[in-house]
Image (cartoon, grey):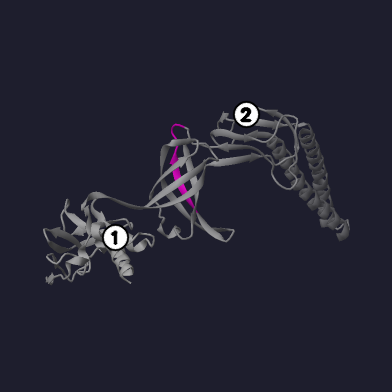
Amino acid sequence: MALTATLLLASCSKKAGIEYETTTVEQGNISTTVTATGTIEPVTSVEVGTQVSGIVAKIYVDYNSEVKAGQVIAELDKTNLTSELASQRANLTSVQSSLQYQKANYERQKSLYDKGLISANDYEQARLSYVQAQQQLTTAQQNVKRAETNLGYATITSPINGVVLSKAVEEGQTVAASFSTPTLFTIAQDLTDMRVIADIDEADIGEVKEGQRVTFTVDAFPADVFQGTVTQVRQQATTESNVVTYEVVISAPNADLKLKPGLTANVTIFTLEKNDVLTVASKALRFSPNEALIAEDETIQGTEAKTKLWVREGKTFRAIPVQTGVSNGTMTEITGGIKAGTEVLADMIFGETPDEATGSQQKSNPFMPGPRNNRNQKNNTSAKK
């Protein structure tokens, strides 16, 4: 239950020069944001390399070339690879012939052994040679497949539909694939669908959620504000110079192809948004009239409510209990208790009356001459002595 009281204030001399700042309760938007920087990159990009060493014989694409999945984009010299395949195929033929001989020999020795015409040792030796020939055939077949695969690797194709972002080799250059696959091309799948990888400070990451609206700008187009959405908040932390950050992935539609891979984005993530709600300046909720300073003919009508706004009606200060919602520190949502358009008090501004200001200046200036009457009185006194 609200308790209303009327207080009469004393000493009007304390009210000199007081003015009141007001603000209006009105419909508006409340938002809180987190800012960061990030890098623009394609959603899908593939580094195309080679698993065999050799000399680059032909290159069929260049920077910004549009490619299709399966399209030949480069070829290595195939001389050695073709020779290796021919050698392995010849070895396979030889092994197949050997296997036929060992099979026939094994069948012959088995027949003699069954008749008791040869020893068990001779039979076992024939059987072992036949088994080894079968194993050699398997190995030879695998070597042929490997040689065929390596020859296929010499023809480099695009794994996806996209655009060539980078080219790391030229015709005639030798590439070595001894320990790692060298990167020859980088292909982006779709430059109309980009993303921003933003680094968010550990103090702000708790407020960032998937689905939040994002705006960002790039230095290349300072007048344009691009729109996006938080699509992923990664759990992996990165520490650099004792600063902990987390990567946040933001969608960046790029229908007009203005956004280019590698651009730095200045990101604003809207972690809270409430539109078309009743709002008031947060300082108005902290305001309370000082009964010791207001005029003696003014009154205060107070209330026990913890959250309230103050209005001034003539010479009366009246508190209105209100219910509040979200706040961004500057503005606070009002969910009930007051109507839009109400003018409320926000602050007391203290000043000086003209007399007080003059007296203050005289007291503070030691070089100001004293009153003329006092000097004449002193001179008369000296003359009489």
Q: Please, what secondary structure does the residue beneath circle 2 have? A: loop
Query: Residue flagged by tag 1: what amino acid is it?
Result: Arg
The quarter of the picture where the C terminus appears is bottom left
Q: Which mark is residue 372?
A: 1
Quarter of the figure with residue 215:
top left
- Give yes or no for residue 249 being in the magenta stretch: yes
Q: Which mark is residue 62?
A: 2
Residue 353 showing in the rendered view:
no
Query: Residue flagged by tag 2: what amino acid is it?
Result: Asp
**Which residues fall within the magenta stretch?**
247-256
Q: Point out residue 105 in the picture as x, y percentages from the top left corner.
A: 84, 48
**Residue at x 32% of width, y 61% of height:** 362
- Give yes or no for residue 252 being in the magenta stretch: yes
Residue placed most toward the observer, 193 or 4: 4
**Residue at x 80% of width, y 52% of height:** 132
Between the C-alphas of marks 1 and 2, the distance is 97 Å
Does 282 appear above or below 257? below
